[in-house]
Amino acid sequence: MKKIKVCKDGPYIVSGNVPLDKTIAEIGESDEPEFWVKKEDYKTGENYSLCRCGHTKNPPFCDGSHTAKKFNGTETAGFETFEELAKTYKGPDLDLKDAEVFCASARFCHPKGGTWHLTKKSNDPDSKKTAIEQACNCSAGRLVAYDKKTGKPIEPDFKPHISATEDPQEDAIGPLWVKGGIPIESADGKLYEVRNRVTLCRCGKSRNKPFCDGGHF
């Protein structure tokens, strides 16, 4: 079974042969991130450990540095669902749900006036298309576009996979982008809501552990 286990004051233990790669945020014409580009695949086994303290010398893997650094990895995130946390922004052809607490500051929502503005103009085909692309590129799943006619979320078709992200524009090591509905279990054995895309902190600075809050900047 594919799963990510948060260890108390330690790494993420990934089990179930989950693929792992390095993916960077590529800058577009807007001078903001517009594309995700995979750079390399990491060699992994059935199980492996990923750093969440930010001190490993072998990123993205854990090298035991959390022990020497006396890392405090206490989880502070709640267990509310996305639907419970999200605010809805309505447009003519799309609705946009926004759970701000999950924001990882990836900035794909910024170009062309922003995803919220584009949602309000979603009866325009180009605006609708861009709003959907931006929402789907939100690695943390903070933003989810919903089809107005069906009421269903528009989600990327992800297979279970983890990407160690990087943000060259900000010269920053980004979060772990968890895709495809991989269950994440807290240190005390409770499951967080299973979602198609979430981001996990790997710098140790998040105030919403285990999730990223943009604290890597």
Image (cartoon, grey):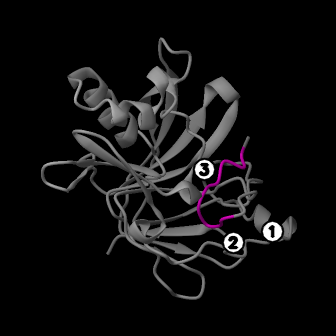
| Residue name at image x 37 percent, y 64 percent | 195
Q: Nearer the viewer, residue 154 or 52?
A: 154
Residue type marked 3: Pro
Element on which disc 3 rests: loop
Most extreme residue toward the top is 29
Query: Magenta span has 215?
Result: yes
**Residue 150, picture quadrant:** bottom left
Image coordinates for residue 64, horizontal then vertical, percent = 73, 65
Q: Nearer the viewer, residue 45 or 201?
A: 201
Q: Tell me the distance, in whole angstroms, between the alpha carbons under discs 1 and 2.
A: 7 Å
Quadrant where the image shows the C terminus: top right
Crowding near the residue tagged with mark 1, few <14, some 14–19, many ≥20 C-alpha atoms within 10 Å: some
- Mark 2 is on which residue type? Gly
Q: Amino acid at mark 1?
A: Phe
Q: Is residue 156 left or right of residue 48?
A: left
* Left or right: 91 in relation to 178: left
* Crowd class of label 3 (few under 14; some 14 to 19; many from 20; radius 10 Å): many
Note whether 71 is above or below 97 in the view shown.
below
Residue at x 80%, y 68% (from the top left corner):
71
Q: Nearer the viewer, residue 157 or 90?
A: 90
Range shown magenta: 208-216
Report the side of 102 relative to 124 (left or right).
right
Provide residue 46's location: percent of width, then percent of height: 39, 66
Mark seen at residue 60: 3
Mark earlier in primary sequence (3, 1): 3
Mark 1 vs 2: CB contact within 8 A: yes
The correct choice, above or below, for 158 with respect to 119 in the image is below
Q: Residue at x 51, y 32 (%)?
A: 24
